[in-house]
Amino acid sequence: MGSEPTYTQTTHAVSVSVLPIYLKNQSRPVDNVFVWAYNICIENKGSHAFQLISRYWKITDALGRIQEVRGGGVIGEQPILRPGENFEYTSSVTLTLPSGIMVGSYKMQIDGGESFDVAIPLFSLDSPHEVRTIH
């Protein structure tokens, strides 16, 4: 740990930072099970409060196979973030290959009912089992 990159993107004054971490102790490479945790921090840098309503994930493995995930809130919550506040959570993903990428978005709703999408930056899922070749 410690060498993993953090990925950050800001949309509509909402900053989303992601730190993916390969979970060696939960992965079983011999069984094609590779597990990552990802810590997310959502920060309201704007002047209006909003609520996180739903999430969308597009998960692509090293062979280009795509899995899409949609759902209400995150980790069973639909947090409200006032200006200057942030919300952090950790979740996980399992792949059958040693690498992949994830990208997504959150649907946020302002108190008056107007909603907007916030981008979750594309981030890389890399394990030490990935074979890399340089041409």
Image: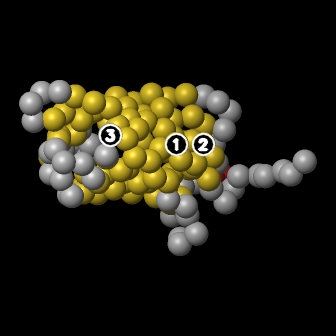
From the top left corner, tell me how far across and down residue 131 is, in percent.
77, 52
Which residue is located at x 69 percent, y 56 percent?
A: 129
Q: Judging from the image, what secondary structure is the residue with disc 2 in?
A: strand
Decide which of tag 3 and tag 2 comes sooner along the chain.
Answer: 3
Decide which of tag 2 and tag 1 comes sooner along the chain.
Answer: 2
**Residue 89 visible in rendering:** no
Rounded to the nearest angstrom, the CA distance separating label 2 from label 1 is: 11 Å
Is 84 above or below relative to 14?
Answer: below
Which residue is located at x 17 percent, y 40 percent?
A: 51
Which residue is located at x 42 percent, y 42 percent?
A: 120
Badge 2 amino acid: Gly
* Residue 47 vs residue 27, the one in the foreground: 47
* Residue 50 vs residue 127, the one in the foreground: 50
Label drawn at residue 122? 1
Q: Which residue position holds label 3?
A: 12
Q: Judging from the image, what secondary structure is the residue with disc 3 in?
A: loop
* Residue 98 vs residue 85, the one in the foreground: 85
Rounded to the nearest angstrom, the CA distance separating label 3 from label 1 is: 17 Å
Decide which of tag 3 and tag 1 comes sooner along the chain.
Answer: 3
Mark 3 closeness class: few <14, some 14–19, many ≥20 residues within 10 Å? few
Q: Is residue 51 left or right of residue 39?
A: left
Q: Which residue position holds label 2?
A: 100
From the top left corner, tell me how far across and down residue 77 is, in percent.
18, 44
From the top left corner, tell me how far across and down residue 10 is, in percent.
40, 46
The label nearer to you, 3 versus 1, is 3
Badge 3 amino acid: His
Spot the residue most to the left. 112
